[in-house]
Image (spheres, rainbow, N blue to C red):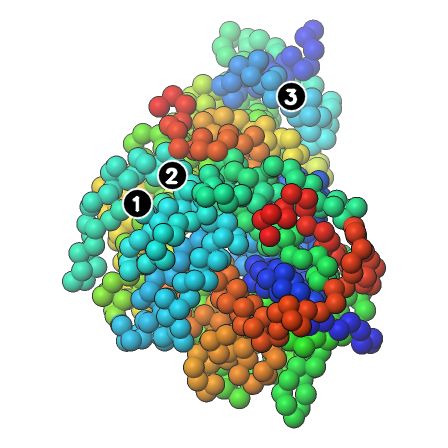
Amino acid sequence: MTADMTHDVVVVGAGVAGSLIARRLTTEGLRVLVLEAGPATPSTFEGYLQHVQTFYAASGKGAESAWPPAIGAPQPDARDLRSDNGYFVQRGPLKYGSTYTRAQGGSTLHWLGVSLRMLPEDFELRSRYGRGRDWPLRYQALEPWYRQAEREIGVAADVADQTHHGIEFADGYDYPMRRIPPSYSDIVLAAAVDGMSVRLGEDEIRLKVRSYPAARNSIPRDGYRPVGAVDIRPDGLGRDLYLGERCAGNTSCTPICPIQAKYNAGKSLARANPAYLTVLARAVASKLHVDPVSGEVRGVEYQRYEDTSSPRHTVHTAHGRIYVLAAHAVENAKLMLASGLGGASGMLGRNLMDHPSIYGWGLAKAPLGPYRGPLSTSGIDDMRGGAFRARHAAFRVDIGNDGWRPTTGAPDTTVVDAVQTRGLYGADLRRYLESTLARQVRFSLNAEQLPSAANRVTIDPRYLDAMGNPRPVISYDIDDYTLAGMAEATRVYREVFSRAGIEDHTDPEHSTWFPEVPYAGGTMRYHGMGHFAGTHGMGNDPESSVVDVDQRSWEHRNLFLVGAGSFPTMGTSNPTLTMAALALRTADRLIAEMGRSSHRQQPYRREQGRSRDLSSGGYTEDRPPEGLGDRL
Amino acid sequence: MARREDVFISLSAGLTGYSPVRLIGTGMCDQYLAELGKVLSDGMVDEFLSAYARPPADGGCSVLKVLRDARWGPVARRVMILWYCGTWTALPESWHAVHGASSADTDHVVSAEAYQAGLQWVAAGAHPAGARQQGFGAWALAPEGV
């Protein structure tokens, strides 16, 4: 084992939270080391395109298909869910249905890009509805960082569409880019659905198809320049490609945007101050060393591998003044537990949440033009908040632009069904497919899940990965509060289908396999949204939370655990934007504490171009792309 | 005798409902014939094409004759899926038992090009996901023919 490297801040994880923190701290002249467990993601556009080719040729085209994992940093895969022989050890009673990616860039490499703010009432669920917990900060307190996050990751939306459910924006504010144009399908559905009302208990709720804010590049406002594809060549110099500065409708946000018009964390790393940043990929943080008296972290032990197909590695330790775990809600908890830092409160790893979701799919009367455009551009948001939350979970209806792809594997399965089952060929086959594929529509109904101490990540010495690190052992259930919300969501989508003249073809017996949960004498099939949260929840009380409002560990004062793991509750928005806002807020706290320019540190390097300062082969970020300087 | 490429395209047009020009335009003919050769053997591909090229004794439809043939029907249906999806679907065990097995006869995407060339995207009035982008905002327009 070698002890090496001293930094101001050691960040574990090059996903969205870690990359945003690294960018902000290095811009202020703090020296940051980022350790990434997974493979490096190419900084050249040519290298990135190889992942696009991997996706084209992949037999399954799931979220992970463009991003093969390393032996040393295994990851969950949706294909393992049914057979239960994947990275997770699923203890049940239900299966946790979500996955994530361990690679430089994290799951932002294949996320959908929807960037909804949480509702003001989401931060006060206990006070308002007697459910879940309150956050230690309110919407208004986080709002400035929501604005910053929307600029950092580049969110396209119109404030005029988003001011509802009590969401308020600062005076004069609008998103950095105009909204992504709604799809033809959104427009047709809105004409049929807008103004209809549904009942949730006592509440009558009027529905409206509403544009989703998304971290995809659109028409900029007020001098903002969209950040397109990253292309930093081996000479260390970035090329300005003008590529990806608008979404071009590749219909492939997941698993890979071929032109990087959608945000990924690599864009933030590329825009960090290279003189103060070191990124080391293929470096698996395996243990935190802690001072037994003060509780402060003294170093991060990590395993460095060169070959992604081998568990061979060397062991090193990185040192800094401050440590930030940004490795993922599950990986953060796993690393703490593996370091013997479960904590006195017993809360670490508990309260694991997701958005358990239900699909509804059908055929419209006339073509809606699916399989075109960003995978979702609108949703029905009206059930995200309201008095009913005292009784059952809130939910959101996400409208897909990709036909039945996520639910049945269409269009391929539609072809196979037409040929093999229906016996069609020739002109009849072509006419059938033209008529059917163009009318496919799909909703995804995402329900809020409350924190429950029994839903948790643990480790067990019997279950280790190839490098000897623990695999996450997951206990998971969905309670009646959430199940009741899922049942209501099912009823609502059927009413919406009926109103819009969509023939319901939802048939979990003939679809992609999804886990099932019994409810009210029947069975519901659910899927995960990849929205892991809650494993190191924030609060005002060290007895019932793991981190404080700044995401600082109560027990280890130079340690921060960031990401959706810090969420006390989930709300119904996908977590990335809120995670980004919290990360930027934490970065500002660190800057205030560690000193700005008055204590400016020596950079790692001053020379032009690429420098090789670390153990060989590490991916190091260097100069920002030319022409990007004005955007920093 | 006609070139095997011509016979294959003629049969494929009858199976898929797309014109020979459209199929040739995908640029996939040679690759698909080679793929069939790997899965079945070149000799068997020739037999398959001959079965189509011989006019039916009763003067009926050559495509239907192939589809109804116990040996060639399952192959012809996989050729349809090949053109529409760019994937090969393994023949059933019962077919292998009678006509022979091949280690190349597995479910697989033929190639990155084959994925992009799938006629399913044309039939949907769309484009292959992740390729042949239609441009900013194109998704807001009505699909072709509406």
Splitting the image into 4 quarters, where does residue A56 fall?
Answer: top right
Give the mark, 2 or 1, whose residue is nearer the N terminus: 2
- The crowd level at tag 2 (other Cα within 10 Å; few <14, some 14-19, many 20+) is many
Answer whether labels 2 and 3 touch (C-beta < 8 Å).
no
* Cα separation between marks 2 and 3: 34 Å
Pick the front one: A104 or A437: A104
| Structural crowding at the residue carrying mark 3, measured as other residues with C-alpha within 10 Å and reported as few (<14), some (14–19) or many (≥20) | few
Say which of A61 and B132 sits in front. B132
Residue A399 in picture, x, y percent from top left: 37, 45
Q: Which residue is mark 3?
A: B27
Q: Nearer the viewer, mark 3 or mark 1?
A: 1
Spatial CA distance of label 2 from label 1 is: 10 Å
Q: Which mark is residue A209?
A: 1
Is label 2 in contact with label 1 (beta carbons under 8 Å)?
Answer: yes
Q: Compared to A146, does B99 lie above or below?
A: above
User: What kind of residue is marked 2?
Assistant: Pro
Do the residues at pointers 2 and 3 share their chain?
Answer: no
Mark 3 touches mark 1? (CB < 8 Å): no
